[in-house]
Amino acid sequence: MSDLFASIDAARLACGFLPLSQMMEILDGNHVLDPFSTLVSAGVSAGRNNIFYPGVTLKTSSGAEIRLGDDNIVHSGSHFEASNGNILIGSKNQFGEGGFTAKANRPGAEIRIGSHGRFLNNPALFGRCMLGDGSQILGNITVDSCTLSDGGSFQEDDPDMRGGLLKGSGVARNLSVARGMVIAGNGTFSSEELLPQRHFHPKP
């Protein structure tokens, strides 16, 4: 059995990931549901009570960092990669179900995500993305260098007070979405398609 663990650790190290024991030390105080399918690099840090489902990757290189706060839920198929910039994440976000990707892997890249956000159904973030508290990305959307403003979470009763939202599928590039606003795209996302979120969720 010791030879098996040594072989697993050697493969991890060869691909830039920590051995199992070191990974569990870094993620102490969190819930790693399947350590054997969870891959973590040395530049990763996490707070407490984050839940990591099977099949999660957090990879760093070139001195970049991935930092998570507390109480995030990271579903299977989530992939975080920081090589040319950091990925900095607050608390109480949901990544997946349905997959999630964040890559700060080109010059000038940085991805900042606040707290209480939802990022579901396979969105992918690249470049310089600033996603404020309560922001949401719902759908198979490639998000390149976009800003979603702070606001309340999806549970906020008043849609005008919720964080910025992108939903649909396609490519969103160099866009800013203010609090209470949404772009629902199919193919290409444009600022001309901005609508109040109350358009889809009327106030009670």
Image: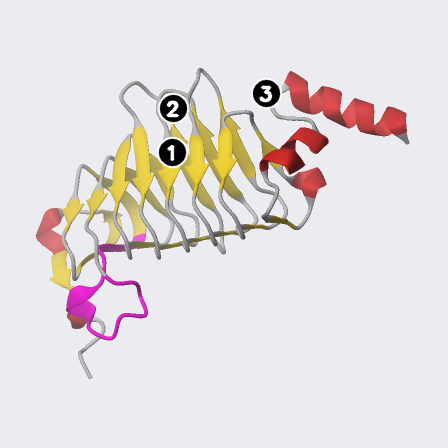
Q: Is residue 67 left or right of residue 134?
A: right
Label 3 belongs to which residue? 16
Check the image and name the residue furthest to the right. 1
The colour scheme used here is secondary structure
Q: Is residue 21 left or right of residue 143?
A: right
Residue 156 covered by magenta stretch: yes
Q: Label 3, label 2: how many angstroms apart (C-alpha)?
A: 15 Å
Task: Say the numbered circle drawn on residue 105.
Answer: 2
Image quarter of the C terminus: bottom left
- Check disc 2 and give the amino acid type: Asn
Label 1 belongs to which residue? 87
Range of the magenta residues?
A: 152-168
Secondary structure of the residue carrying numbered label 3: loop
Mark 3 or mark 1: which comes first in sequence?
3
Q: Label 3, label 1: how many angstroms apart (C-alpha)?
A: 17 Å
The answer to which of 69 and 112 lies nearer the viewer is 69
